[in-house]
Image (cartoon, rainbow, N blue to C red):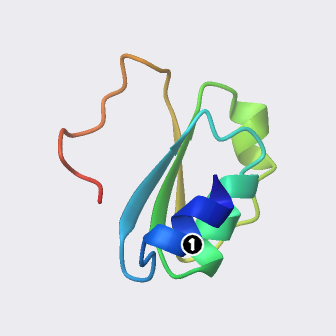
Amino acid sequence: TWELLQKYTDIKGKRAVDLGCGGGVFAQLLATAGATVDAIDISNNALKAIKRSDNITTIQDMVPNTRLEDDAYD
């Protein structure tokens, strides 16, 4: 998935969401590539494990009924 995103998408400057982010590995990759990321997980412990950065916001929520706004992400 990561290789496909890099190949077909310009990630820099995009707003992305990582649903069910767990420890935030994918969120971290997106942020490092220049995206602003909302990392969503039901587990507060998983969210605590995510390395904090200016480009990552952690939100405790559950899928599929999140409180996220429609059309808020690239």
Residue at image location 46% in from the left, 69% down from the top: 8
The foreground one among 44 and 13 is 13
Residue 55, horizontal then vertical, whole percent: 52, 73
How many numbered discs?
Answer: 1
Q: In which quarter of the image is residue 7?
A: bottom right
> Does residue 48 lie above or below 20 as drawn?
below
Residue at the spot 65% in from the left edge and 41% down from the top edge: 21
Q: Position of residue 45 (x, y in %)?
A: 78, 34
Q: SS of the residue at dot 1?
A: helix
> Above or below — where is 23 with respect to 63?
below
Q: Point out the image quarter for the C terminus.
A: bottom left
Percent coordinates x, y for residue 66 in the rendering: 37, 25
Q: The disc labelled 1 sits on which kind of residue? A: Gln
Query: Residue 2 sits in which quadrant?
Result: bottom right
Q: In this view, does 40 lie to the left or right of 32?
A: left
| Snapshot quadrant of residue 12 | bottom left
Horizontal relation, residue 1 to residue 50: left or right = left
**Which residue shows up at 29% across the image and 54% down it?**
73
Farthest residue to the top: give it. Answer: 65
Name the one closer to the observer, 7 or 33: 7
**Near-viewer residue (67 or 25):** 25
Residue 15 in the figure: left or right of residue 52: left
- Identify the residue shown where x is 76% and y is 55%: 25
Per the image, the residue denoted by label 1 is 6
Reply above or below: 45 against 50: above
**x and y, in percent, of residue 63 in the image:** 47, 20
Crowding at dot 1, Cα within 10 Å, few <14 / some 14-19 / many 20+, comes out as: few
